[in-house]
Amino acid sequence: MLGATEPGLVDGLLLLSYPLHPPQRPHELRTEHFPRLRTPAMFVHGTRDGFGSIDEVVAVLKLIRARTVLLPVPGAGHELVTKRNHEEVPKLVVEAFRLFASGSISVTEPEQAP
């Protein structure tokens, strides 16, 4: 939320398992500050996360008026743990964020403000 109130504070955001809503309460979204974000943001989210589905994350990324990218982690829940080697997911996240920060990763561009 600090990124929304002080947009020049950082060059990019890395959001790991952002809790869009409490489990089984999708009507209680925690995204009221998203339209104020002007900082590029990379979201890492498990495909089995009870705090928001991949489809829900994709939908709310449209609220952010900066570059965004979503890195889904197949089979992971909110804790981003999978049956893979325990070092594989962190390495994947670090490499993806490095590419995102350098502008070398495919991103969604924000819709133009009215």
Image: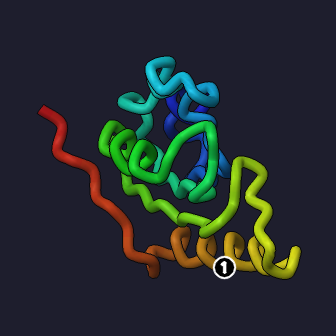
Q: Secondary structure at mark 1?
A: helix
Give amino acid for label 1. Glu
Q: Residue under circle 1?
A: 95
Rendered residue at 55%/68% (across/down): 101
Residue 63 on image: x %, y %: 33, 37
Q: Nearer the viewer, residue 63 or 85?
A: 85
Q: Position of residue 97 (x, y in %)?
A: 61, 69
Residue sitting at 79 percent across and 79 percent down?
84
In this view, the residue in front, 85 or 67, is 85
Can you say whether 100 is above or below 8 in the image? below
Relative image position of residue 70 (x, y in whole percent): 48, 60
Q: Quadrant of the C terminus?
A: top left
Q: Is residue 88 left or right of residue 16?
A: right
Residue 113 vs residue 5: left or right? left
Q: Residue furthest left?
A: 114
From what the image shows, is residue 65 above or below residue 29?
Answer: below
**Of residues 72 and 68, the one drawn nearer to the viewer in this rendering:** 72
Give the quarter of the image for residue 34. Answer: top left
* Quadrant of the frame with the N terminus: top right
> Badge 1: how crowded within 10 Å, few (<14), some, or many (20+)?
few
**Residue, x 38% and y 39% (percent of image)?**
60
Q: Residue at x 48, y 27 (%)?
A: 26
Residue 62, percent across and down?
30, 44
- The residue furthest front is 24
